[in-house]
Image (cartoon, helix red, strand yellow):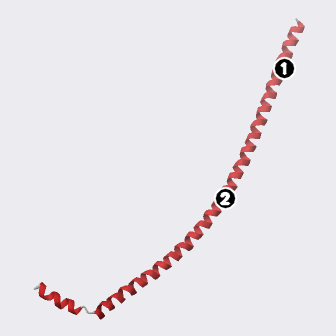
Amino acid sequence: MAVAMMPRDRESWSDDRLDDLNHKFDEGFKDMREEFRAQRTEFRDEFGSVRSEIGGVRSEIGGVRSEVGGLRSEISATNRLLAQVSWAMFGTTVVGFLSVIATILATN
């Protein structure tokens, strides 16, 4: 029975009906293509704004790096100053002890 229906179904699919179906498919895909184009345009715009924001962040990072470099140089200067003060205090203490020892030896 299925074999008997096949020829009738084939006959019902005329070239006009197939062309109509083909046209419907084309119209459906045309709408999809337009939507995809709109999405791509939106993505490009959004990615462009994200890229510009990333550029701003990079410049901010550069500013932070330069500030950190300035802090490092200030810390190094402070460390040098502390080392100089420590050596000066040590030298003064040594000279004081030597003068006390010299005074004790001179009085004996």
Between 38 and 6, which is closer to the camera in this rendering?
A: 6
* Amino acid on which disc 2 is placed: Glu
Q: Is residue 37 above or below residue 14?
A: above
Q: Earlier in the sequence, mark 1 or mark 2?
A: 2
Check the image and name the residue furthest to the right: 106
Q: Is residue 44 above or below residue 62?
A: below
Q: Is residue 84 left or right of residue 103?
A: left
Count neighbours of disc 2 (C-alpha within 10 A) and say few if under 14, some if 14 to 19, many if 20 or more. Answer: few
Between 49 and 64, which is closer to the camera in this rendering?
A: 49
Residue at 74 percent of width and 44 percent of height: 73
Q: In the rendered image, which quarter contains the N terminus?
A: bottom left
Check the image and name the residue furthest to the left: 1
Q: Is residue 29 left or right of residue 76?
A: left
Tag nearer the camera, 1 or 2: 2
Tag 2 residue? 60
Dot 2 lies on which element? helix
Tag 1 residue? 96
Q: In the rendered image, which quarter contains the C terminus?
A: top right
Calculate the distance from the C-alpha at mark 1 to the C-alpha at mark 2: 54 Å
Between 6 and 89, which is closer to the camera in this rendering?
A: 6
Residue at 89 percent of width and 8 percent of height: 107
- Could you say which quadrant of the image residue 4 lies in? bottom left
Residue at 71 percent of width and 48 percent of height: 69
Locate residue 12, reporting x and y percent: 22, 92
Residue at 44 percent of width and 81 percent of height: 33
Locate residue 20, reporting x and y percent: 33, 91
* Amino acid on which disc 1 is placed: Gly
Q: Is residue 67 above or below residue 86?
A: below
Locate residue 2, reporting x and y percent: 12, 84
